[in-house]
Image (cartoon, rainbow, N blue to C red):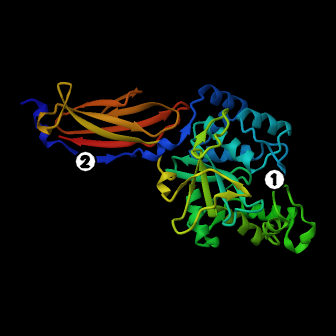
Amino acid sequence: MAQYNRGHLWKLRKYEHTERSAWLDDFHWAPEKGERQRLREETKLKSELDALGTEWQKILRIVEWVHHLPSEADGGSEGTNNHNAFYLLLGGLSGEVPFRCVEFGFMLNHTLSAFGFPSRVVTIMQKECEQGIGRAHVLTDVWCNDFNKWIAVDAALNQYYCDQAGNILSAIELRKLVREARWSDIIGSRESAIRNEYAVWGPGQTKEDCRFDEIFVPEGFTREEMWDSLRDTRDFECYWKYLLSLYYHVAWSTKHSLIEPLPQNSLSTIFLCDSKEMPPIVFQSIRRQLTFTCESARVNFPINGVEVRWQLVHEGQAVDSIEKAQEIMLVLRQSMPWFSHYQVRIGEREFLQEENFIPVRLKIGETRIEITPINDCNRIGRTAYLTVVV
């Protein structure tokens, strides 16, 4: 009796994989292999990152490096509309480009991309963000395989957030806690250090220490809306609550490039809405074109994995009956930006391949299969596991 005649007894004992979300196609990370290599070289971070053990340690080192990159950081300046990675790198080092949260967010996005960590530029906004200024902030959302999730990291503050249980938070998780006014459940990684820095900065301009008729009114704004948008930062607790309140609204940029400008159209940013409230269509007195969604899965999907399906095959042809099958043909769909190849293990056999099809001969007994996607920085993704028993 041929081995494959027992195919009707074929079973899956283990099946763990990462399904590729249809929403992934809304996002685009430009290949730019040469530009990413150049940025890796110019940051001079590679050897230092290689010495670190985990992805999360590497990500935190990149955040810290970007935080200390600019010789001049000025949250009140006009900054620049040029977010090219090399323009920001040289401008930050020379002091010719003052860094606001926008420049920090883009530079962190670029640097993470250069080292193979997929990330997205994120804009967060207060509930009343339609008028006045200072009601928004820019940071970065990075995918970390160590936690199998997106994580919000802020290069301007050199900070990330946890809940009371120590779980590191994504932008969506922060948004939920802020909307539920669970302020004490959010812990900043540098909260104590920022408290000390606040003691040096002082509260800044508040309603308590300025006059309505003396406040600065930029062109295009009214005195009333500028007065209403003054931050309540009279003490650290108020300042900290202001920082957290910015997570009430969250919007994700969908196009990511080191050298190309961000498209200014309705497809370039996805704004997560609440079905029970009207989203803001004006931000700081400017009407913006955004893609609105109430589905968190549209922005909160897993990546860096591989989805595994299969076809039944007999003499090289697909069949619809398990009794006729000699082998199974694994069909792969990866969700890894800058994908390079798969590392495959079938039983004791190991090999690398770029193709999305793997034939597996059916044999009596147990066959263990492992498939891991790897990107062009040799950063590994989430492994898929299958155990086939005949």
Q: Residue at horizontal 85%, vertical 66%?
A: 223
Tag on residue 119? none
Q: Amino acid at mark 1?
A: Gly
Residue positioned most to the bottom: 208
Residue 130 position within the rendered picture, expressed as x and y whole percent measured from the top left = 70, 62
Quarter of the picture holding the N terminus: top left
Above or below, comparing residue 226 to residue 91 in the picture: below
Looking at the picture, tell me which residue is in the foreground, 56 or 252. 252
Give the labeled residue for mark 1.
75
Task: Count up the numbered dots.
Answer: 2
Q: Amino acid at mark 2?
A: Arg
Task: Decide: few, some or many residues near mark 1? Use Cα within 10 Å; few <14, some 14-19, many ≥20.
Answer: some
Q: Residue 47, image x and y in percent?
A: 66, 33
Q: Nearer the viewer, mark 2 or mark 1?
A: 1
Q: Position of residue 207 (x, y in %)?
A: 85, 72
- Comparing 204 with 15, the one in front is 204
Q: How dense is the environment of label 2, judged by Cα within 10 Å: few (below 14), some, or many (20 and up)?
A: few
Circle 1 — which element? Answer: loop
Left-right relation of 18 to 67 = left
**In the rendered image, which residue does mark 2 sit on?**
13
Kindly identify the residue that appears in the image at 79 percent across and 34 percent down. 90
Q: Can residue 30 be seen here?
A: yes
Tell me which label, 2 or 1, sits earlier in the chain.
2
Left or right: residue 39 compared with residue 218: left
Q: What residue lies at 9% left-to-right and 29% top-to-bottom? A: 2
**Furthest-left residue in this view:** 1
Q: Secondary structure at mark 2?
A: strand
Does residue 210 appear anywhere in the picture? Answer: no
Answer with left or right where residue 363 lies relative to residue 101: left
Location of the C terminus (image quadrant): top left
Position of residue 254 measured from the top left corner of the image (x, y, whole percent): 57, 44
142 over 333 or under it: above or below: below
